[in-house]
Image (tube, helix red, strand yellow):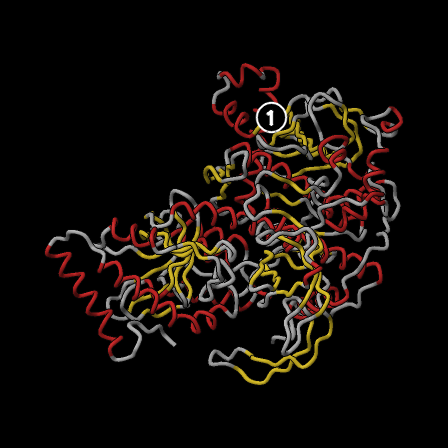
Amino acid sequence: MRAVLHKDRVKARIVRHDRKNRPEGRVTEIIERSPNPIIGRLLHESGVWLVAPEDKRYGQDILIPKGATGTAKPGQVVVVELTEPPALFGQPAGRVKEVLGEVDDPGMEIEIAVRKYGVPHEFSDEALALARALPDAVRPVDKHGRVDLTDVALVTIDGEDARDFDDAVYCEPAKVGRGKGWRLLVAIADVSHYVETGSAIDIDAYDRATSVYFPRRVIPMLPEKLSNGLCSLNPNVERLCMVCDMLITAKGEVHAYQFYPAVMFSHARFTYTEVAAILANTRGPEAAQRKALVPHLLDLHDVYQALLKERGVRGAVDFETTETQIVCDDAGRIEKIVPRTRNVAHRLIEEAMLSANVCSADFIAQSKHVGLFRVHEGPTPEKKDMLRSYLKAIGLGLTIGDDPMPGEFQSIALATKDRPDAQQIHSMLLRSMSQAIYTPMNNGHFGLAYEAYTHFTSPIRRYPDLLVHRVIKAVLKQAKYQLPALPTPGEAHAKLSKRLAARAVESDQKPKKPTVDQLAWQAAGLHCSANERRADEASRDVEAWLKCKYMRGHLGEEFGGVVSSATSFGIFVTLDAMYVEGLVHITELGSEYFRFDEARQELRGERTGMRYAIGTRVRVQVSRVDLDGRKIDFRLVHEGEELMTRAMKDKSGGGVFDGPSDERSGSRKGGDKYADKRADKSAGKRSDRSAARSTGASDRGAARSPIQSLKAAVKKAAAGAPRKSGKPSKKPRR
């Protein structure tokens, strides 16, 4: 494997299967070398210049010839371009292409992430020139053929830190059929008016496919003049928009809808916190400042309650999860990590956007025009079997059928919400579901219980929404929207076509040969789906780096936490006060033999029967931080241990770890299929280190009580006895 690097495309041959029946292979041919640059730290050791890759999956340092370092200095973070690939008996060589700066510079983690994941972060000169040529405000010529909604009290409701405003809402009571209801307007920024198909801005937007959000920084899909200016529905200025005008019944059903281009005037920029305060107290200070708009907010709340009831009737899955927000200071250091709470204003806007998205999908489906749908299919047969086994193992009387409906998942969630293990059950329900994708094949949205669903409401930050706007406009004009000549990913495109055909076979449908137009839309959908994953991974990578750096200042400290995941190599624990997750390796759980119960998703001690499952409360000590690997190690705190001794031991023992932690899985949920193998290979080393740390703690003990002295002596004897016989003190399961 020394002749290949991470991301190289190779041809391999399966030679055998391991004890878990996983295939093992041998590389027979290198098909293509990865063109991506490598990011790492420049080192000068024994007269030799090296770059240690930031991504440990590369596995080898890069040799840098003496004259190829440029202006870089030792210790700086650099971008390297390979000049010589690795060989069986030789290291790869390269040259410094870009100097990013010192590793502790503010924002360095973001600079690393955008290059590590290949996130486009610079607009082309042509796109910037085209953006500069656009007007600064809506012109009279732009209003031609549009409905004038400037007198309608449309408002935006977003977070405190939002800078681009995609959507505005308005609601008023209306007669629907013979009963009462509401007229709900959802106005969305008309990006398609300014971003023409195939233009330089359009090409850059397609390449990015989505905006990427980091703490303190956003990499937008569109140039700032559009995203924060001309397209953003800023307050007290005219803006062009596409409107979904709906009539909602008292039962929360969409009775009728229409789409049309319009010009609007945002009457206010609300925040979620402000709207929630007004709805909670219509005579409070927040309501007094917005007296003229309070009746419209109350109408919005009324229609929201109706839509919420219809959601329950529909059986849509609705799990409450805790999202976190990282609060940083001016230097980019974490001040605190706080939960991002969802209030009634968040849910109000969510239901309004869902309604507009459903109408968009229905409009495209009824027109027979090809477009992109947001598809979320039900669980796979393997995931269904795993969930059934788990529900049976915990003795729950509820289960799912062979062809489950979303309501079955929601019924289980509601029935177990007050149980002590509710978090564990809801986590397993979530894990059993598939990821949503963009595709022209409408297979419905399982989680939301919709027959057709798409994304219409965020064209400033999502390219699929921009495509949906273009299709709707084409249908309104009784025309056909033609995709531009976009780059198509050959291999990935083939995989998607194969997967869609397989789904058709599973549903007893004869797979149809897609047309050229459908193939182009499939490729666009796959591209947008892949870049959505890329943006999520880059954001998580930066958050993990910031959390690791934050926890370096808490080495040796103890915290309470909850088990968030159980695997065959240990448990992941999320701290209560900090919402930071770390690993307690299986060798740190105690001196007994632990077995992983896959059905129950728990680790169980064979001697004591001690169980560690999702939701189990534990107390841990921060024992190690791997900043490069974005990993945090905890040690379980057992009753009777001395806090001061452990703190002194870790503070003096250099708990900061700059190398990779081999026993750790690459996935926070233990999803890496090779995680168990890596854990098995390195568990012995970890066991020896754990025994050594325990012995050291005993030796350094200060004044102890007789019981503590006895416990320390027993621990020392137990740790020392195996060493005399040449065997490790603790052996993990093989």
Residue for badge 1? 270
The answer to whether residue 408 shows anywhere in this view is no
Q: Residue at x 71, y 29 (%)?
A: 233
The image quadrant of residue 636 is: bottom left
In this view, 518 is above or below 501? above
Image location of residue 161, percent across then percent down: 59, 32
Q: Which amino acid, by three-letter code, is at mark 1?
A: Phe
Q: Please, which residue is most extreme toward the front here?
A: 47
The quadrant the N terminus occupies is bottom right
x, y percent for residue 124: 80, 45
Residue 645 horizontal side relative to residue 657, left or right: left
Q: Residue at x 76, y 59 (%)?
A: 523
Q: Quadrant of residue 4?
A: bottom right
Where is residue 170? Give x, y as percent: 66, 27
- Secondary structure at badge 1 equals strand
The residue lying at 56 percent from left, 15 percent from top is: 289
Q: Is residue 72 above or below residue 733?
A: above
